[in-house]
Image (cartoon, helix red, strand yellow):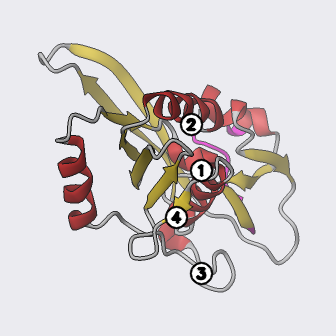
Protein backbone atom coordinates (compact mmCIF):
# COMPACT_ATOMS: atom_id res chain seq x y z
CA UNK A 1 0.00 0.00 0.00
CA UNK A 2 2.98 2.30 0.65
CA UNK A 3 4.18 2.04 -2.97
CA UNK A 4 0.66 2.85 -4.22
CA UNK A 5 0.37 5.91 -2.00
CA UNK A 6 3.94 7.09 -2.63
CA UNK A 7 3.53 6.98 -6.43
CA UNK A 8 0.20 8.87 -6.36
CA UNK A 9 -1.64 6.00 -8.00
CA UNK A 10 -5.09 7.43 -7.30
CA UNK A 11 -7.14 10.17 -5.77
CA UNK A 12 -10.22 9.52 -3.65
CA UNK A 13 -13.40 10.84 -5.27
CA UNK A 14 -17.14 10.20 -5.31
CA UNK A 15 -18.19 8.13 -8.31
CA UNK A 16 -19.54 10.46 -11.02
CA UNK A 17 -23.04 9.73 -12.25
CA UNK A 18 -23.13 7.34 -15.19
CA UNK A 19 -19.67 5.91 -14.45
CA UNK A 20 -18.81 2.48 -13.12
CA UNK A 21 -15.87 1.08 -11.24
CA UNK A 22 -13.36 -1.64 -11.97
CA UNK A 23 -12.88 -4.09 -9.11
CA UNK A 24 -9.55 -5.02 -7.57
CA UNK A 25 -8.01 -7.71 -5.41
CA UNK A 26 -4.82 -8.41 -3.50
CA UNK A 27 -2.45 -11.06 -4.84
CA UNK A 28 -0.03 -12.46 -2.28
CA UNK A 29 3.24 -14.19 -3.16
CA UNK A 30 6.27 -15.44 -1.31
CA UNK A 31 9.62 -14.39 -2.79
CA UNK A 32 12.43 -16.87 -2.23
CA UNK A 33 16.18 -16.37 -2.43
CA UNK A 34 18.25 -18.51 -4.80
CA UNK A 35 19.00 -20.94 -1.99
CA UNK A 36 15.27 -21.43 -1.34
CA UNK A 37 15.11 -19.45 1.90
CA UNK A 38 12.52 -16.74 2.46
CA UNK A 39 13.38 -13.34 0.99
CA UNK A 40 10.10 -11.49 1.65
CA UNK A 41 6.34 -11.61 1.46
CA UNK A 42 4.87 -9.60 -1.38
CA UNK A 43 1.38 -8.13 -1.79
CA UNK A 44 0.29 -6.63 -5.10
CA UNK A 45 -2.97 -4.83 -5.76
CA UNK A 46 -4.35 -5.99 -9.10
CA UNK A 47 -7.21 -4.35 -10.97
CA UNK A 48 -9.85 -6.65 -12.41
CA UNK A 49 -9.17 -5.47 -15.96
CA UNK A 50 -11.43 -8.14 -17.44
CA UNK A 51 -14.36 -5.90 -16.42
CA UNK A 52 -13.09 -2.99 -18.54
CA UNK A 53 -14.94 -2.02 -21.72
CA UNK A 54 -13.06 -1.06 -24.89
CA UNK A 55 -13.70 2.57 -25.88
CA UNK A 56 -14.90 3.46 -22.37
CA UNK A 57 -12.23 2.35 -19.89
CA UNK A 58 -9.36 1.96 -22.35
CA UNK A 59 -8.41 2.67 -25.98
CA UNK A 60 -5.07 1.00 -26.72
CA UNK A 61 -3.39 -1.97 -25.08
CA UNK A 62 -0.40 -2.70 -27.30
CA UNK A 63 3.11 -2.56 -25.87
CA UNK A 64 6.07 -3.91 -27.86
CA UNK A 65 7.99 -6.94 -26.64
CA UNK A 66 11.71 -7.42 -27.28
CA UNK A 67 12.40 -9.70 -30.23
CA UNK A 68 14.47 -12.79 -29.48
CA UNK A 69 16.91 -11.98 -32.30
CA UNK A 70 17.53 -8.52 -30.82
CA UNK A 71 18.32 -10.05 -27.43
CA UNK A 72 20.70 -12.53 -29.13
CA UNK A 73 22.51 -9.71 -30.94
CA UNK A 74 22.83 -7.79 -27.68
CA UNK A 75 24.28 -10.84 -25.94
CA UNK A 76 26.73 -11.43 -28.80
CA UNK A 77 27.92 -7.81 -28.47
CA UNK A 78 28.42 -8.38 -24.75
CA UNK A 79 30.66 -11.29 -25.74
CA UNK A 80 33.13 -8.65 -27.01
CA UNK A 81 34.02 -8.14 -23.34
CA UNK A 82 31.36 -5.49 -22.93
CA UNK A 83 29.77 -5.40 -19.47
CA UNK A 84 26.22 -6.73 -19.30
CA UNK A 85 23.74 -5.53 -16.69
CA UNK A 86 20.20 -6.61 -15.94
CA UNK A 87 17.79 -4.38 -14.04
CA UNK A 88 14.34 -5.25 -12.74
CA UNK A 89 12.00 -2.30 -12.29
CA UNK A 90 10.01 -2.73 -9.08
CA UNK A 91 6.34 -1.80 -9.38
CA UNK A 92 6.92 -0.96 -13.05
CA UNK A 93 3.28 -0.44 -13.97
CA UNK A 94 2.88 2.14 -11.19
CA UNK A 95 5.19 4.36 -13.27
CA UNK A 96 2.80 4.56 -16.22
CA UNK A 97 0.47 7.57 -16.45
CA UNK A 98 -3.12 6.84 -17.44
CA UNK A 99 -4.68 8.85 -20.25
CA UNK A 100 -8.14 7.38 -19.76
CA UNK A 101 -10.47 8.08 -16.85
CA UNK A 102 -10.67 4.86 -14.82
CA UNK A 103 -12.50 4.47 -11.51
CA UNK A 104 -11.73 1.58 -9.17
CA UNK A 105 -13.26 0.19 -5.99
CA UNK A 106 -11.23 0.80 -2.82
CA UNK A 107 -8.63 -1.89 -2.10
CA UNK A 108 -10.09 -4.76 -0.04
CA UNK A 109 -9.54 -4.08 3.65
CA UNK A 110 -9.30 -0.29 3.18
CA UNK A 111 -12.95 0.52 2.39
CA UNK A 112 -13.49 2.22 5.78
CA UNK A 113 -10.58 4.61 5.21
CA UNK A 114 -12.10 5.70 1.89
CA UNK A 115 -15.33 6.81 3.63
CA UNK A 116 -17.67 5.93 0.75
CA UNK A 117 -15.33 7.30 -1.92
CA UNK A 118 -13.65 5.35 -4.72
CA UNK A 119 -10.30 5.57 -6.52
CA UNK A 120 -9.88 7.69 -9.63
CA UNK A 121 -6.73 6.13 -11.04
CA UNK A 122 -3.94 8.46 -12.12
CA UNK A 123 -1.29 5.77 -12.61
CA UNK A 124 -1.49 2.41 -14.31
CA UNK A 125 -2.01 -0.65 -12.16
CA UNK A 126 -1.34 -4.34 -12.72
CA UNK A 127 -4.38 -5.92 -14.33
CA UNK A 128 -5.57 -2.91 -16.32
CA UNK A 129 -5.62 -3.55 -20.04
CA UNK A 130 -3.71 -0.35 -20.85
CA UNK A 131 -1.01 -0.74 -18.16
CA UNK A 132 1.73 -2.30 -20.34
CA UNK A 133 1.32 0.46 -22.95
CA UNK A 134 1.30 3.24 -20.33
CA UNK A 135 4.47 1.87 -18.66
CA UNK A 136 6.30 1.49 -21.99
CA UNK A 137 5.39 5.05 -23.04
CA UNK A 138 6.76 6.46 -19.78
CA UNK A 139 9.92 4.34 -20.08
CA UNK A 140 10.49 5.36 -23.73
CA UNK A 141 10.10 9.06 -22.95
CA UNK A 142 12.60 8.94 -20.09
CA UNK A 143 15.17 7.05 -22.23
CA UNK A 144 14.74 9.31 -25.28
CA UNK A 145 15.19 12.33 -23.01
CA UNK A 146 18.73 11.01 -22.45
CA UNK A 147 19.35 11.17 -26.25
CA UNK A 148 18.96 7.46 -26.89
CA UNK A 149 17.58 6.53 -30.30
CA UNK A 150 14.76 4.01 -30.44
CA UNK A 151 15.22 1.08 -32.81
CA UNK A 152 13.09 1.07 -35.96
CA UNK A 153 12.79 -2.71 -36.34
CA UNK A 154 12.58 -3.39 -32.60
CA UNK A 155 11.05 -0.54 -30.61
CA UNK A 156 12.26 -2.04 -27.32
CA UNK A 157 15.91 -1.34 -28.20
CA UNK A 158 17.54 2.03 -27.52
CA UNK A 159 21.06 3.03 -28.63
CA UNK A 160 23.26 6.00 -27.78
CA UNK A 161 26.46 6.79 -29.70
CA UNK A 162 29.00 9.06 -28.04
CA UNK A 163 31.38 11.49 -29.73
CA UNK A 164 34.29 9.15 -28.90
CA UNK A 165 32.77 6.44 -31.09
CA UNK A 166 31.53 4.43 -28.13
CA UNK A 167 27.99 3.24 -27.53
CA UNK A 168 25.49 2.09 -24.94
CA UNK A 169 22.56 -0.18 -25.81
CA UNK A 170 19.55 -1.13 -23.76
CA UNK A 171 16.56 -3.39 -24.32
CA UNK A 172 13.40 -3.51 -22.23
CA UNK A 173 11.22 -6.60 -21.85
CA UNK A 174 8.12 -5.66 -19.83
CA UNK A 175 9.85 -4.62 -16.56
CA UNK A 176 13.30 -6.12 -17.17
CA UNK A 177 16.07 -4.03 -18.71
CA UNK A 178 19.33 -5.30 -20.22
CA UNK A 179 22.15 -2.78 -20.73
CA UNK A 180 25.50 -3.25 -22.46
CA UNK A 181 28.01 -1.23 -24.42
CA UNK A 182 31.63 -0.15 -24.55
CA UNK A 183 31.00 3.17 -22.78
CA UNK A 184 31.13 2.30 -19.08
CA UNK A 185 30.63 5.92 -18.01
CA UNK A 186 27.41 6.27 -20.04
CA UNK A 187 26.12 2.90 -18.83
CA UNK A 188 26.70 3.86 -15.19
CA UNK A 189 25.05 7.24 -15.77
CA UNK A 190 22.05 5.66 -17.50
CA UNK A 191 21.59 3.08 -14.74
CA UNK A 192 21.47 5.94 -12.24
CA UNK A 193 18.96 7.86 -14.39
CA UNK A 194 16.73 4.79 -14.70
CA UNK A 195 16.88 4.08 -10.97
CA UNK A 196 15.97 7.70 -10.25
CA UNK A 197 13.14 8.03 -12.83
CA UNK A 198 11.58 4.59 -12.41
CA UNK A 199 11.53 4.02 -8.68
Q: Reply above or below: 95 against 40.
A: below
- Give the foreground label among 1 and 3: 1
Q: In terms of secondary structure, where does tag 2 sit?
A: helix
Q: In terms of secondary structure, where does tag 4 sit?
A: strand
- Give the foreground label among 4 and 3: 4
Callouts 2 and 4 close, C-beta under 8 Å: no
Callouts 4 and 3 close, C-beta under 8 Å: no
Gap between marks 2 and 3, in whole Å?
Answer: 33 Å
Labels 1 and 3: the sequence-earlier one: 3
* Region in magenta: 100-111
Callouts 2 and 3 close, C-beta under 8 Å: no
Residue identified by numbered label 2: 194
The residue sitting at 87% across, 56% down in the picture is: 14
Gap between marks 2 and 1, in whole Å?
Answer: 8 Å
Gap between marks 4 and 1, in whole Å?
Answer: 9 Å
Residue identified by numbered label 1: 143
Inspect the magenta stretch and tell me whether residue 110 lies in it. yes
Q: Is 91 situated left or right of 94 in this image?
A: left
Q: Viewer-proximal residue, 107 or 7?
A: 7
Amino acid sequence: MNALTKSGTWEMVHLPEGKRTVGCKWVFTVKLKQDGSLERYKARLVAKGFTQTYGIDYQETFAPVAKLNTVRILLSLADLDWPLYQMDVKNAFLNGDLQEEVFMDPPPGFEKQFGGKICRLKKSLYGLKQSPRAWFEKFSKSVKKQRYIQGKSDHTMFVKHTSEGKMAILIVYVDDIIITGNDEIEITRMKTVLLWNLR
